[in-house]
Amino acid sequence: MKAACQGLTGRRVLVTGATGFLGRRVLPALDRAGAEIVVLLRDPDVACGADLRARYPSVAVRTGDLRDPGSVEAALAGADTVLHLAAKAQAGGRFNEAPDYFACNVAGTLNLLTACARGRVRRVVHLSTAQVYGRSDSLLVDETHPVDGRTVYAASKIAAEGLVRAYAEDGFSAVSLRPSNIYGPGQQAATVVTAILAQLAAGDAITLQTLDPVRDFVFVDDVVQAILAAAAAEAPPSGCAINISSGEGVSIRQLAEAAIRAVRNGTPVTLSARSGLPAQADRLVCANDLAAAALSWRPAVTLSDGLAQTFRADWARATPDTAQETEAA
């Protein structure tokens, strides 16, 4: 991350989604890099906006909505780099919610890219998702794999990626990042990782919907490194999409067992599955060779270390048997 941060010194960077899971980790990294930070918030008076102002007094807060072209253009004034992290991002999304997904993820991205094309922006980093691949029979999915929008969320991200690709032909550099399953401290969304760790904090049993699907998990700080690397890289392949992943397949059973080893030090824990709806994809594991070649990026945090860090930060105080370990860590 150090080299990427050096490349951002003095750059005026607009961040959307600054109060989200990733945005909250990106801001301190940009601040340490000496970047001039601007954030676009729909409501800067809510608690997260007030906290942002308190933590980063030098950050310029602009009020607006990505769906409003005027407020987007005003927020973008003077920026040369854009980190577009904002999205309506529930993994599935009901079809009756499709207008909301497309208004935020597609129309909002269109407004932002249009403003970038009019301004002096030289780099746009758009956060997409590996869910654009849908179902796959491949052991390892690279960026040449066809996209398959089987959910409203994935379909909206495929459309947004298309806009990024089209606008990248218009004079500025733009790239979409496709992170796999992101996890880490401060994650509020209901994910399989948060479900496992919450149950470990509460007792000696873990019950999950299913244990068989194989996924690819990447720690939040590694994703932040990738975002900064994409923003600072001299010449990433403009318009393309790049996987940000561990490149390692882990079944849900293996994930739970890794969490037990990481946070329970051998304490017996029962693990079981209940019947339920089938997973969206039985296996989705993404190659990260393009990220290594184009961004000089590889994940640095192991699954075991990432799970332990997340548990210590978010749940360890709830379990008396881990309190002393946490205080000594």
Image: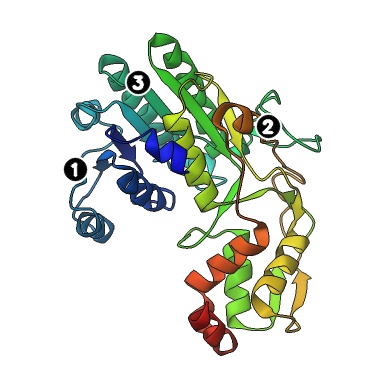
Q: Position of residue 280 (x, y in %)?
A: 69, 45
Q: CA distance from mark 3 to mark 1?
A: 20 Å
Mark 2 against mark 1, which lies toward the viewer? Answer: 2
Q: Residue at x 52, y 52 (%)?
A: 220
Q: Residue at x 81, y 38 (%)?
A: 139
Q: Which residue is mark 3?
A: 122
Q: CA distance from mark 3 to mark 2?
A: 25 Å
In the picture of the structure, the residue carrying the numbered disc 1 is 60
Is residue 227 depicted above or below 162 in this figure? below
- Choose between 280 and 127: the one closer to the eye: 127
Quarter-wise, where is residue 145 in the image? Answer: top right
Q: Is residue 146 visible?
A: yes
**Which of the marked residues, 2 or 1, is nearer the chain's N terminus?**
1
**Dot placed on the residue nearer the N-terminal end, 3 or 1:** 1
The quarter holding residue 53 reads: bottom left
Q: Is residue 327 above or below residue 2?
A: below
What amino acid is found at the position of numbered circle 3 in the picture? Arg
Residue carrying label 2: 289
Residue at the spot 64% in from the left edge and 35% down from the top edge = 150
Coloring scheme of the render?
rainbow
Q: Is residue 210 visible?
A: no
